[in-house]
Amino acid sequence: MVNFTGEYGLYQIIFQKSAILYAQRRALFTEIIQKFQLAFVPSRMEEMTYFLIFITCRATNYSVRIYGENQKLIGKLTAYKASRYFVEQLTDLCNPTMEGFYLTTVFMTVLQGEMQDATLEFLLTCATEIIHEVERLAAIEFTHYRRLLLDLFYHLVPAYFRIKFHFSLNNVLIDKIVAQYGEVYEITSVALLPLKKILGKSIPKEEVGFFTILFGGEILNQRKQQDVEKLQALIVCPSGISSSLIMKSELTTLFPKMDFLETNSFTQFEALANEHYDLIFSSVPIQSTVKVYVINPIMTEWEKNELLRKVYQDRSIPIRVFPSIIEIINMLLPYVSLKEGLNKKKVYELVHKKINRKINGKEGDKPMLSELLTAEMIVFSDEEMDWEEAIAFAAKPLRKTNKISANYVQAMIAKVKNYGPFIHIGKGVALPHARPEDGVNELGMSLLKVTKPINLLHDEEHPIRMFICLAAIDSEVHLKALASLTKILSDKQKLEYLLNATNKNEVIQLLKGEA
């Protein structure tokens, strides 16, 4: 029995209508990409070709309707010119004008945003707001802001059109993304509020996952990294732009000093055959004259360390990662008996995890909000004070426990004076913080609840009822706590309970999830 599912089944359906229809539509599709210089995702060519065939078959009988503001927006896009050209080459459409508008929305779901397209400036503004939201909620400052803004904009454009016009996106890696970047996922979900407002609808978790990868990789890159040899590396990922984005994020974190060039198809890879690159990271086996490392888009800690070891050994790069763990385990295994269910790989992962925490000064998992905001770190006050005094008052428990120096208090105040009320993270809650090098001795948080709201920068638009001071040692270890705080701020009932708390126990119960 012949299986007519998948791509083969689609082709057989089309072949029954016309033996040359597939070739005609693909040729026309390729022509408009070149003619209008569209930044198309190569891996989506086949998928889009089939989709266009079925769209044009449907359009001979009835048309999709797009009206009002949507039509005005679409009509100004560069992709609309390409869509009009496409439908003009077809003679049997019942409503070519409407199909031109609809086809543009289809194209925009897989096109990279173009800075030159003035119609999309509102999404560039949205990208800026999203970055600022992540910085506020995660209490970090991105060092490569311009690069991040462009990367976010390029991803934001197709995501906007997918969500707005109900084109679902299958993200098979969403569970892995949430598991590996859990805290960043929670923060990103809230930080996407500017996009949610523009769309007037919620952001699907599959889309949130891809934004999470972008920010997760950038946050991890904020950490201090050891210098390695400057290498040119090629990323080959025919699975699509989503998997390619994930691979690049993972690799950039592991090898921050490498220059990466991406390709999403074998055609692109072959076109780059004569270009200079020192090594290749690929999601599939390929033939090349340079060293190829076949990896998964999302790697386990075991896979990451194995890749590090192989690359550094192959390039003769001296670096102290964890080169001796597996050797030590191999030496010990002949003399020990493993418990049932344990094997060498699992033992390695356990040892690697513990050593990694030790090296980074983290004996346990990233602390929870309730572990940082203990009773001794929470203060209630009905005193009259201005915003500067409130920040200093809120920081007293951190000073008392020597988690910060006096300089850090002044640095928190100075940041507000220099950058405005950015610490107001909404709903009457402020998150004063500064850089680790400004005087942080140990990770910590402290909370001040005031009876009467205090206007931040003496501005009535920023009344603060609760100051939560953060002393972070890096850009990552505090994220679990801030993700929990973000969840509370996003829940009206929990937020109201927190702001109306009258004693420490009520706050602690809420932070522990007991209220």
Image: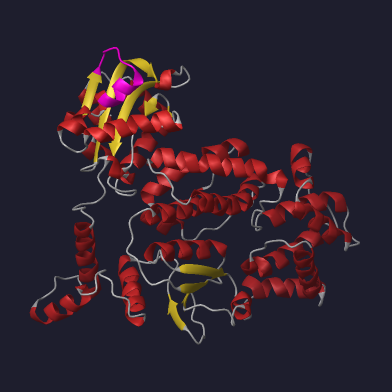
Q: Residue furthest left?
A: 335
**Is the C terminus in the top left, top right, bottom left or bottom right quadrant?**
top left
Q: Which residue is located at x 33 percent, y 33 percent?
A: 412
**Is the N terminus in the top left, top right, bottom left or bottom right quadrant?**
bottom right
Relative depth, front residue between 227 and 247: 227
> Viewed as shown, does residue 497 lie left or right of 277?
left
Q: Which residues are magenta?
A: 381-392
Relative depth, front residue between 125 and 232: 232
List x then y, in percent, for residue 205: 49, 49
List x then y, in percent, for residue 407: 26, 34
List x then y, in percent, for residue 312: 33, 76
Q: Which residue is located at x 23 percent, y 43 percent?
A: 443
Q: Which residue is located at x 74 percent, y 42 percent?
A: 73
> Viewed as shown, does residue 191 lie left or right of 483?
right
> Viewed as shown, does residue 140 lie left or right of 93?
left
Question: Is residue 285 located in the magenta-colored stretch of the structure?
Answer: no
Q: Answer whether residue 511 is visible to the viewer in this image.
A: no
On screen, residue 58 above or below 372 = below
Q: Which residue is located at x 46 percent, y 16 percent?
A: 460
